[in-house]
Image (cartoon, helix red, strand yellow):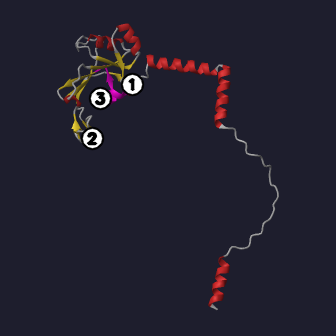
Amino acid sequence: MRRALIMFAFALALPATAHARDYGQRGTVFPVVERDLLEQIQSRLVTMEASGETTRLNEELKRRTLARVERPSPVAGIARASESRSWLFDPTIALQQDIRGARGELIHAAGTRVNPLDSVSLRADLLFLDGDDTEQLAWALRQQGQPKLILVNGAPLQLMRARQRRFYFDQQGTLTSRFGIRAVPARVRQQGRQLEVSEIALPARAEAGQ
């Protein structure tokens, strides 16, 4: 009886006999024909070259690149200062990894707080301004000590040619964001181990030395 039960259970575990059946063709069958991707790209390039589209696109890219160099995108969120305010900025940073010398010697361990001003001083004031604002420009050019002129708007190369002074541009607002500057003109100068940041509200006619 026990053997019979085992054989019966084994029979239940086996799959039922499959019966093959031809259901015929249910739709149109097409062969798989896929054009090589590189071949498509090459064909497109040849067509663009023959039609002159490649030359046109290259010229457009060149024009847009030169325009962006001549006049970078303005820094967003920067207005003309309507009131003066100042604050201190601590440039100290906490190192994310060990700093080692050329021979592998440990100079600063990760986590060490380092103030860059302990090693390198700010040689000249940083002046941030709108290069399209004639009053801000005139004020900046009158400042003593050859400060670095950094635009948040305007055409730096055009001003360099016209004024024979080097102008920089705060690309993507990296510096103004770092210092918390929201209005111009603004000045950054060293005060000991910190930086003094000032937004300066100019009168209708800027006075030298303000």
Residue wearing tag 2: 98
Q: Position of residue 147 (x, y in %)?
A: 27, 16
Q: Secondary structure at mark 3?
A: helix
Question: Which residue sits at x=41%, y=15%?
Answer: 155
Residue located farthest toward the left when viewing the structure as drawn: 192
Left or right: residue 70 versus residue 42 is left
Please state which of residues 209 and 14 is positioned toward the viewer in this rendering. 14
Q: Amino acid at mark 3?
A: Phe
* Residue furthest front as drawn: 103
Marks 2 and 3: which is nearer the front? 2
Q: Return the residue at label 1.
A: 171
Residue type marked 1: Gln
Label annotation for residue 179: 3
Q: Residues within 10 Å of mark 3 (few under 14, many from 20)?
A: some
Q: In the image, what residue occupies the spot 68% across and 80% down?
A: 11
Where 13 sits versus 52, above or below?
Answer: below
Asked whether 127 or 157 is in front, the reply is: 157
